[in-house]
Amino acid sequence: MTPPSPLDLRVAIVGAGPAGIYAGNLLSRAVAETGGTVAIDLFDSLPAPYGLIRYGVAPDHPRIKGIVASLHEMLDAGSIRFLGNVEVGRDLPLDELSARYDAVVIATGAIRDADLPIPGIDLPGSYGAADFVAWYDGHPDVATEWPLDAASVAVIGNGNVALDIARILAKHAVDLRTTEVPDNVLAGLESSAVTDVHVFGRRGPAAIKFTPIELRELGEVQGVDIVLYDEDFEGVDPAAAPNNQLKIMLRTLQSWRAREVGAASRRLHLHFYHAPVEVLGSERVEAVRFERTETDADGALRGTGELRDIPVQAVYRAVGYYGTPVAGAPFDAAAGVVPNVEGRVHDEEGAPIPGLYATGWIKRGPVGLIGHTKSDAMETVAHLVADAAAGALAPRQGEGDIRERLDELGVEYTTWPGWLALDAYERALGAGHMHTRERVKVVPRDEQVALAREHTLIRS
């Protein structure tokens, strides 16, 4: 077999979440196997790396956030150069980026909420899950205050994000004091008026989209009663579940049904077979109307015609995320993804655009866990390397350092040394806090940039 010819590539990756970092790491290895070299620049619109791992995972999930250790190792190896606080398509046009690199990989993910097209969904008191998650994770582009004046809250959705939101809303703030939750968020949660959180799913318990760990964590929340309803469990047999994961979760739910309810100051209600029909209210949310559902003999979901109005003063829709487009790149607005075939981005006529690729949720939609993201990046990188070897990439124009161009444009970009300085600063804040914490996040963008820029201006 003839060994592959050495490649000499410059590649830009847009998005510094897991998808982008995995793609960069895999690309570095793949090019090294040819005996060639690759210079990889990783751009992100935020001053800090890690995307949804930093701004989309609940602060009381230290185990899940452990993935940061491996992402840190990949960026710290030096084969990928991080350039934060740069929004490609706004601060730097995509066509200019494409001209300076052999290939561009879009890995912007999905940070917006998917729509829930029912009447009343835009009433005051109705919120998207992504916005609330961004608030409690200290996202710099979200307001620092969040209205938590509702006693009864509805969370619409039956996935892990819905559980995260319900848990944070129901949890007593004192139990979050040792996490990395920002100070403004902790203050907001401490003054919360919430007493009852209702989680609604269209399907039954045997069709939940949680994971066993997420569900188990819900049952470990102190000072919160979990309320289940017998009508939702008629005919439910954990032993008949098609896989062990679902069996475990159904047994967990069944065990909660045996618990005594009434002693706690807060309650978390899990409702099944409820399809949202309308959000009710005149000037703000007052209730949500649901249609009771059921499954037919073939397992298909259908409405029963029975309507139920549940009084609540706030609604959170957790029905999925929507992809984050890049100005200048093709975008399928209906699907919320960049149109592509196995990671090769296509134009409106369906023809591949030389040198433009996609990976992660912006490629396949907001489904799957971290493991899927890695295998997804492998597919995209394999096509990029194959196209490079076949001479199918458009020739790059210009050899100058992109940082010089960013300086010309007045973009206050951040770098990996800058992130390390910001990371150390946040950890020091946590260590000096009255409740010892892993870190206290710096929330304002300008403060993050200022702290990181002190070290960013040192050329590497």
Image: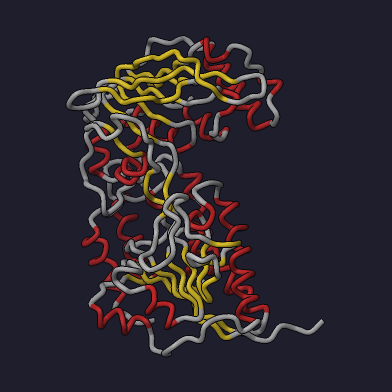
* Residue under the image location 51 percent in, 50 percent down: 365
Residue 1 located left or right of residue 267? right
The image quadrant of residue 434 is top left
Q: Position of residue 308 (x, y in %)?
A: 38, 14
Q: Position of residue 417 (x, y in %)?
A: 37, 71
Q: Position of residue 194 (x, y in %)?
A: 28, 24
- Determine if residue 53 is in view: no
Q: Quadrant of the C terminus?
A: bottom left
Q: Position of residue 129 (x, y in %)?
A: 36, 39
As drawn, which residue projects farthest toward the left?
283
Q: Which color scheme did the rendering employ for the protein?
A: secondary structure
As drawn, which residue projects farthest toward the front?
349
* Residue under the image location 38 percent in, 36 percent down: 116
Q: Quadrant of the N terminus?
A: bottom right
The image quadrant of residue 326 is bottom left
Say if 129 sits above or below 139 in the image: above
Say if 396 sits above or below 44 in the image: below
How many numbered marks have been drawn onto this rendered protein structure?
Answer: 0
The image quadrant of residue 60 is top left
Q: Nearer the viewer, residue 51 or 353?
A: 353
Say if 69 sits above or below 213 in the image: below
Say if 204 sits above or below 57 in the image: above
Q: Nearer the viewer, residue 178 or 352?
A: 352
